[in-house]
Each structure stands twice: as structure tokens, then as C-alpha cells.
Amino acid sequence: PAKTMDELVSLCKRRGFIFQGSEIYGGMQGAYDYGPLGIELKNNLKAAWWRAMVYERDDVEGLDAAIIQNKYVYKYSGHEDTFTDPMVDCHECKSRMRADHMKDIKVCDNCGSTNVTEPRDFNLMFKTNVGPMVNEESYTYLRPETAQGIFTNFKNVVDSTSRALPFGIAQIGKSFRNEITPRNFIFRVREFEQMELEFFCKPGEDEKWHQTWVELRTQWWLDQGLGKENMEFEHVTGDDLAHYSKATVDILYKFPHGFEELEGVANRTDYDLGSHTKAQEEFGLSAKVKKNEHSTTKLAVRDLEENKMIVPFCIEPSAGLDRGVLAVLTEAYTEEELENGTSRTVLKLKPHLAPIKVAVLPLKKNKPEIVDAAKAIKNRLQKLGLGRILYENTGNVGKGYRRHDEVGTPICITVDFDTIEQEGAPVTVRHRDTMEQEVVNTADLPSFILNYFVN
Ligand code: ATP
């Protein structure tokens, strides 16, 4: 794994994974842009999540709700009142910082001075104006989590799919938080993506489901290549527990800057649906909620055993996509000494996450027959639907191998004279991790590649 953040930042910029946002104007703190390879990696991680959470289960539906929602969503969700971080100012160097890591010892992050203010609450939501009239009522917020769109659509999903408990609704999308101190590359940013599942169950079954989801999510991260030894769990307690949560288990990963939260699995009880539902008094809610005077809809579902409408409990595994990208990059980054005394950088990404699945390299740059054969192979493999297959004609296969090691391409195929002579001619297949080469007939290539990537 990577030892420092700097080596990751440098690789990401050099090879086109991730760039500083607004770089040509001096940057924009807490905003990053994903480049040609970063977008592939990110899409692959999203696809793996969606596959595991929606397609491979029969009790989860998908959703893509709007980022901009009615301001009442945040009034009743509790975010307007309580989605804050404690902030302090330093009297000496005038910098401002998030204070919750300071606990009792209050020392400025920037200059080390103890001459800092008392912490005060800072709301992390971005406020924005909606419509052409700017007045006291025309505001809303950019969503600070995707979850609320799931709760507000609860009845739509239940009515359109006839779901009964237990079942879940999954969503991937952007969230925004005006973090006081964005830092550590894409770990803490102001615009990020979340992959969230809200899993609804009967009260009383919530603790069992909470435990189950911690286990399932941990296994999923292991399947993305993270090492068991680099993961830890933290039971969140006291002040750190979110306003909606009965219990939260954080899944931590050993990032270059230390063990930090990758995903939180929270037991949100009946807080959210209970906050947003009409006729709250009918449901004997267990959570303490604000009286809702605006909702038009009952967010309840029939309990088939007791034959009555109930507001279910909700278990939420909420993962940060950007933190996921950072974690798999950290884990995959490898510096290797080779037998001939040289070294190489190789990204040992799981094949399903690799931004480029296969690179097809003609051995000679200026031989039309070889070039055409290589292009034909690219086109054939591209049709398999595995992701990006790259035809690359630089004429320097050795350099191509090194570059593809560095960006994690699991397989390179080189095409030379032999290939063009007859159908079924051999090509050389080179494996990223072992650097071993084997000969495969072109006629067998599609099934060879399919077998390699689909398991
Ligand atoms: P932290 O304590 O690190 O601020 P959090 O507990 O506020 O995180 P949650 O509200 O539980 O985070 O959000 C769920 C997930 O969303 C987190 O586990 C994390 O992966 C991701 N996430 C939250 N805030 C950010 C951020 N500022 N930048 C990137 N990812 C984030």
C-alpha cells in the first residue's frame, strides 16, 4: 500500500486520475476533478456497489432523487438545527478550524498556539437561492446526504413496487458539505459522492439487521481489494453520534494519514420517516421528532403480521465514494524491486475496478497490417462490454507495459507480425501483477478475456 498521500496525489495527477478543482485559477479548496482514468475507476466502484446492493439482492430497489429539494426536507430532517461541526478561531494566526478533534486540549492546527476561541456551532449545509426572486423564503440547501431523497420518496417506491418489510432503497449521488477544514486530498472535501442504502425493517428486528449490514459491507470492501489488516471498526458513542442515530458502527480504513472513517452503518430508527410523515401521532413513534405541519403523506407500510400500518425502522450503510476511491488506490499502490535491479510502480487494482481493462499494443508502429490487426482485436474485445479496451500505438511496448502497470491495466496484448498471417494467429498476453506472458490465439481471445474478467 501507499505510505504517503504525496505519492498518491502525484500518481493521480501524472496519469490523469484526479486533478485539483479550478486549478488554473489557483484551485478551489475541497473540490477535485476526476480525469480520464479517475472517472473509469469511480464508475467501476459505483457499478460494483450497485451490483452487490441492488442486482444481487431481491429486496432492494434503486432511486435517483434530486439534489435540490424543498427546504422543509431539511427543517424536518433536523439538519437545519443540528447538522453542525464545532469551529474555533485562532487569535494568533487568524485561521479557522474544526474543533471536534481537539476535545480538551485546544491547540491551533496551523500555528500551535493555545490562544483560540471557544468552539461554536457551524452549520455545514450550503445555502442557495432558488428562483428569480431573492427573499427570505426563496432559499434551500444543497443536500448534505443523499438519504433524505429516499425518505421523501418512501411512499412512491412502496406504492409502485408493492414492497413489504424488510426491504431497502439504494442511491448513489453527490452530496455537499461546507467543511470547515477540507484536507487529505479527496478524503474530506466539500463536494463528494455517497453510496447509501436505507434498509427498512420492523422495529425489534433493527439490531439484527444493523449487525448484518456491518458484516455485509465489510465483506464488500474486502471484495474491492482492501486488506483485512487495514480495516477497523468503531462503535460511535456520545456526542459523536448523529442526531438521528440509536447506534452507529464506523468502518475505518488505514488511509495514508491514519485510520479514518470509510463508511458509517447507522441505526436511524423510525426517526426519518417519523419526522417526515403526516399524522405522526397515529404511529406511536419511538424517536423524538419535531411536530410536522407540512407533510402531505403518511410514510408508513403495512405490517402483515399485525395487519396495521407502521413506520418502519431504518438501517443505513452510508459509504463515501471518493473515500472508497482513495482507499482502493492506497491499497493497490505498490513499489516493486525487480530482479534486474530496476523498480516499478504498479497499481494492483482488482480487475473489475481497473480503469483500462485491456491495452492492445501493436509491436511495430508503422506496419499497416499489424496496426489493422490490433485495431480489429480492440474492436472485438470492446464489444464484450467489460469496460474500456484501449488501442495504443506508440511503438514502444516496454514503455507501454510500465505505464499500464502504473495505472493498473491488468492485461496487455501485443500484436506482431505473426498475427496478420492467418485467422487464429497468436498474440502475446502479458499479466500486470506477475509480468508473465503467454501466447493466446486471436480466435480464443474473447473467451479468454471474458473468463479473466467475469468470475
Ligand atoms: P466525518 O466524521 O469523517 O466527517 P461523517 O461521520 O460526518 O464523516 P457521515 O455523515 O456518516 O460522515 O457520511 C457517510 C459517509 O460519507 C462517510 O463515511 C464518508 O465516507 C462520506 N463523507 C462524509 N463527509 C465527507 C466529506 N466531507 N468528504 C468526503 N466524503 C465524506
Image (tube, rainbow, N blue to C red):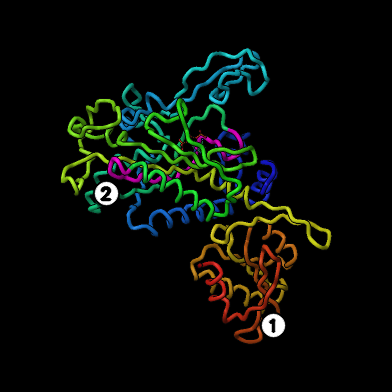
Q: Does the magenta stretch include residue 200?
A: yes
Q: In this view, does 91 lie above or below 393?
A: above
Choose the circle earlier in sequence order: 2 or 1. 2
Instruction: Answer few, some or many: residues within 10 Å of disc 1's Cα (few below 14, many 20 plus, some between 14 and 19).
Output: few
Residue 239 locus on image (x, y percent) = 46, 25
The amino acid pointed to by label 2 is Leu
Residue 410, by quadrant, is bottom right
As drawn, the label of residue 165 is 2
Q: In this view, does 279 lie to the left or right of 255?
A: left
Residue 196 locus on image (x, y percent) = 41, 45
Query: Gap in Å between the C-alphas at discs 2 and 1?
Result: 61 Å
Q: Which of 206 and 189 is in front in this view?
A: 206
Q: Is residue 264 above or below residue 293?
A: below
Instruction: Give the foreground label among 2 and 1.
Output: 2
The amino acid pointed to by label 1 is Asp
Residues drawn in magenta:
183-205
Q: Nearer the viewer, residue 378 or 135?
A: 378
Q: Which of 48 and 381 is in front in this view?
A: 48
